[in-house]
Amino acid sequence: MITFLACLALLAASYFGYGRYLERLAVADQKAATPCRSRFDGVDYVPMPQWKTFLIQLLNIAGLGPIFGAVLGATYGPVAFIWITLGGILFGATHDYFAGMISLRNGGASLPEIIGKYLGRNMQQFLRLFTVVLMVLVGAVFIDGPAGLLGGMTGLIKPWWVAIILAYYIVATLLPIDKIIGKIYPVFGAALIFTAVGVMGALIFGDMQIPELTSFANMKSNAASFPVVPTLFVTIACGAISGFHATQSPLMARCMTGEKQGRGVFFGAMISESIIALVWAAAAMAFFGGAGGLNAALTEHGGSAAWAVETISNTTLGRVGGLLVLIGVVVAPISTGDTAFRSARLIVADFMRIDQRRLAKRIRICLPLFAVGYAITLMPFDVIWRYFAWTNQTLSVATLWMITVYLSGRGKNIYVALLPALFMTMICASYLFVGREMIGMDYTAGMALGGAVTLGVLLLFVRYMRKR
């Protein structure tokens, strides 16, 4: 319990400590003009109150990540607490805050556009394609998963649910952001928080024992095949750092009415997500009697994090648990898939310079995206999902290097972004070489190559900055 409470306190305190430091580093100016005023279009650039933008941002970046990822990450043992806490503060919150603020100061521009501004046109062109593909992939994943679950819960066959969810995506993506997203998503975001608070209450006041961190030992059943470095840092993504978050931040950057709201919306949503992940990692270990029991239970049920979440929810929260499952396993991924397609539309519109005020122009962009998304749902789910986590973390690497260049150009402390950029470059490069579903090399050789790639990227960065 002490480890859990200490990590919880650090996360909460970081909003008032490290968050304020980053706000000063960014020189946030509440009087500065924001895109929702200067570019108001009634569709994507629409002013919203801060409480709404915070809850929408939280729901958009959450999806299944802070719940399923945390449950799977808990199989490594209490070491997962450390990555969620330090990763959430020093990596994820820094990444999300500056990605959102840079977009805010560039007219709410999409991620590839601001990365191109600071890392060059070649990187911009690559990330335009890379990010759109990732957004469509995310949207497809979050059609397929909820459709399968709803099919099992209702008896209505999966293809019908695919059609229903896709129809909702089309409507929500085309309509102005304040019509559906602005009205419904804050309610679901609040529900995500309330249910996490319910599980936390069961942990603190119940009779379950949360394991303490006594070593950094890997407690997975097959530890040799799943080394903590780099595998844990890819398994727990959304609860610590996620490149996908930076694709969602421009949605809210276009709706914020002041720069001072950035700490609450971007930093605050990431810290809230880390707290949710911490709660679920603790609940997964405590409920099943430790990491060993969790590993055994997941093995028995085919590694299904959904089964673990449902079991924990229904046991600890009773009837409320059913609502939690509905929100966490169905509503949250659907909302994330919706905003993923919306982000894809905006990215395409940005680089093709297509004004989005007219519905016909929005449809022209969306139809090909949804056609590709539907085609992807016809593939096996495990094939779609297999490379998602690594791709997601790789996008965070590009964002962190962009933030480093941004801070350097303003004469600010670059190390808040440079050190996380180097670490995540090492993690993603190493995973590419040693991951079982990737190249699958010998661990020592793969880690050495990951280190070499990281050194090479650092040298390229130094050369690039000298040219600038």
Image (cartoon, rainbow, N blue to C red):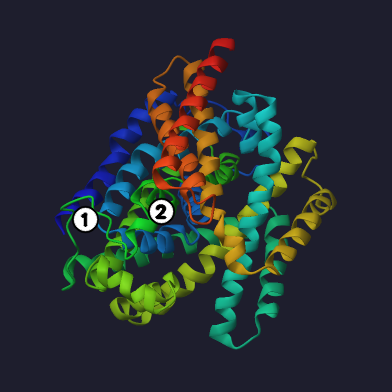
Residue identified by numbered label 1: 4
For mark 2, give the secondary structure: loop
- Can residue 215 be spotted in the picture? yes
The location of residue 335, given as percent across then percent down, is 57, 61
Residue type at mark 2: give it: Ile
161 vs 212: above or below: below
Residue matched to label 2: 236
Residue type, mark 1 in image:
Phe
Residue sitting at x 51%, y 48%: 53
Label 2: few (<14), some or many (≥20) within 10 Å? Answer: many
SS label for mark 1: helix
Query: Where is residue 271 shown, x and y percent of the image?
Result: 37, 47
Front residue (pair 191, 6): 6
Q: What is the C-alpha distance between the residues marked 2 and 1?
A: 17 Å
Say which quarter of the image contains residue 172: bottom right
Give the residue displayed 43% in from the left and 45% down from the top. Answer: 241
Q: Is residue 355 left or right of residue 385?
A: right
As drawn, the label of residue 233 is none
Quadrant holding the C terminus: top right
Residue 262 percent across, percent down from the top left: 46, 37
Question: Along the polypeptide, which appears first: circle 2 or circle 1?
Answer: 1
| Quadrant of the image containing the N terminus | bottom left
The answer to which image quadrant residue 411 occupies is top left
Q: Which of labels 2 and 1 is toward the front?
A: 2
